[in-house]
Amino acid sequence: MLRIQVYLATSVFALNLAALIWAMTKYDVDDARGVGTLYTGNCQRTSTINSSMHVFLNVISSLFLGASNYCMQVLVAPLRSEIDRAHRRGVSLDIGVPSFRNLWNIQHQRVILWVAIVSVSTLLHLIWNSAVFASTPFTIFTAAIATSDILTAHDRWENSTGAIRHANFTHKQFIYGLKDRAVNFTRLDKRSCLKQYIDPLKATGDLIVIAANWTSVQNNGSSLIQGWVDGNSADKWSAATAWICSAYETLGWTRFCSLDWALSFLDDWVLETWEAPRQRRVAVAYCLVDELRGNHERCGLHFSAPVVGLVCFCTLIGALLILWTARKYQVPTIVTLGDAIASFLEHPEIEVYDVDRTARRSIFGRKRHAVAIEAISWSAGRPTTWFRTVSVGNWLLSYTVFAICLIVPSYLLKKALARIGDQGLPIGISELWQQGIGRVNGYALVGGVWSKANRFVDFSRQIFLANVFHILVSFMYLIVNNILSRQLVAAEWTRLLYVNEKKPLRVSSPQGMQRSSYMLSIPFRYSVPLMAVCIWMHWLVSQSIFIVQTTVFSSEAGNQRIAWKDNSRIGFSVFGIILAIITEGALVLGLLIHSAIRKYHSIPADFPRMGTCSASISAACHPPKEDTDAYLFPVSMGVVTEKPLGHGGCTERLTLSTWIDLQEPKDGSQYMQPVVVHSVGNNQNYFSKRSRKWSRLRWSFFGFPLKGWRRGVSDEREEMVVVQAT
């Protein structure tokens, strides 16, 4: 199975490398940030291609990270020698599940390799979705407010006293030139003019707004009232339409000039001048506009060469690490439950007897629950939910991660709604839906230090912010994967109790009648939907907060391209964030419901959790001595009869075996069997139910055992005699 992961990781690297070579040879990278253009054309088509590309990116990235996760679980799985060494120190290891605890008990080389794979995967999360992004076109045009007699006045604007805002010599010449060009401009009424210039995709021609209440005589003999170059500051392009609503702004220039707001004052539309001897309110009569060249065919799809190059480098390193894992560590680790059972059946561990040889107990678990082999009654009580398979400590960690993964986007949603609301825009569900998912809107942009990136360093910061939330999705995936792994390994463990349905062991390297493992712990009916949900969530995140590229044109000289003014911002989609939160909540709720309704029947409450505990598995792998080579054949767990251990000793024992006379354990009958002991010292009384739960919670929370936690590990330990298991 590791070979498949090697092929998968290598294929993803080869695909990325081929894409980079193709893009670099076919398209120019003429941007200071290393940005190239893949496609320029219709904006609707560009949006569709961009969304499809991100679906594809998230599919291949999830497959690559899935291969890395598989390799990480193989690396953290212990060798048999590591299990034996841990057992001698009284530590039980996790079997068949992703485990941080195992890291402290495996070879240092594998730990380093595991950390390296985690590091590469984390870096990929921070960059992969910004390898490709869309751009929105933006035209810098020259505009002026002129008196109603502009076409008949014989003044020269070069000699005008009209105000010109923030313009250099070149821009002033453009503004002055509007006077002579005005005779060739097209007249638009107020409504048409407003609709044309409030949409950045349509505002492409130079503009003269004609005042209804001013003549050149009233303006010191000049027909120029005010002039400016709109959008000259490329990082402020989202506010390029603010001049339309300037006279009605009451919120400190924070309200977004939307079409709905502008239409509300259309009949009384006035403009407010600035930087004149005094501010004046100019009523709009109509507009004169130059030839319009629609921006609807100028949207672009871009790639970042440094990002794609870094993705190639990281996928190469990841593929090499996976290949190194597959080739260097030829000694099979105990990855699956079947691997552990086969190993312990082939080479059973020694057992520890009491002095009078009336009870056997393992020495495992001095730092966890004690796993003892004792003669107790088989207690098949009420059905046990799958919740019990996962320890309190793991649930606490899971709830913490789930809470973070829901609180962070909820906070972002609050800030996004506040930003939109502060701009005077409606925030109802229908309005948010109309704003779209992954769509660029001038009012839905992150401001502050993230608002300008015409250098690669600034662009890198934006990439980090736009992708950091993908890490939360991966954390959630890993936690859900861990919980499901524990529950499904426990289900596989409990199914072994069907003595009439012996099952071949599912192992990594099959022998005899063993069967190969096409999975680690989670079958396809779980792993495929989980991976699909993970891909969907990554795509939603990529469409909720994303890089927005501006492609700048000039209204002069036939709308020429001004590449050096290109910039980027971080855009966000409120509805995309809402869908991401709903999906995350549904995933968590589905996991909890699944854990509550799925149940184990006719078994002791603690029995399912033993399926991931190396000590418990070992304690159940002591078949009769005549049952040689049991690990090669189908096995089940049942009761066998053996010679008494001493006076009053129990003669029936629960074990894994191929024995034909295995009996199914009966409720109330007493057998020698693995148990998790919660008693204190030599006292046979068990803790009360409430006390046990509180003790577990305290242990799981603080991470260390309580004094007198387990039976047989108090300061007054009983004398024991070690004998070889038979």
Image (spheres, rainbow, N blue to C red):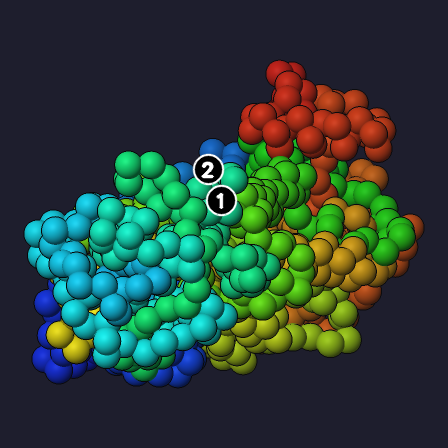
Q: Does 694 appear above or below 372? A: above
Say what secondary structure mark 1 lies in. Answer: loop
Residue 292: percent from left, percent from top: 30, 78
Tell me how many marks there are: 2
The reply to whether residue 218 is in sight is yes
* Frontmost residue, 658 versus 100: 100
**What residue sits right under mark 1 in the picture?**
249
- The kind of residue tagged 2 is Gly
Viewer-side residue, 584 vs 322: 584
- In the depicted structure, whether residue 49 falls above or below residue 478: below
Q: Look at the image and tell me whether residue 362 can be seen.
A: no
Would residue 693 be found to the left or right of residue 22 on screen? Answer: right
Q: Nearer the viewer, residue 401 or 569?
A: 569
Q: Which numbered disc, 2 or 1, marks the residue closer to the eye?
A: 1
Q: Which mark is residue 123?
A: none
The spot of residue 715 in percent (x, y) is: 62, 16
Placement of 451 over or under 430, stated as above or below? above
The disc at residue 252 is 2
State which quarter of the image contains the N terminus: bottom left
Which amino acid is tagged 1? Glu
Q: Position of residue 487 (x, y in %)?
A: 66, 58
Q: Is residue 680 left or right of residue 414?
A: right
**Outermost residue to the front:** 217
Give the vertical position of 82 relative to 494 (above or below).
above
- Quadrant hosting residue 624: bottom right
Q: Residues within 10 Å of mark 1 (few under 14, many from 20)?
A: some
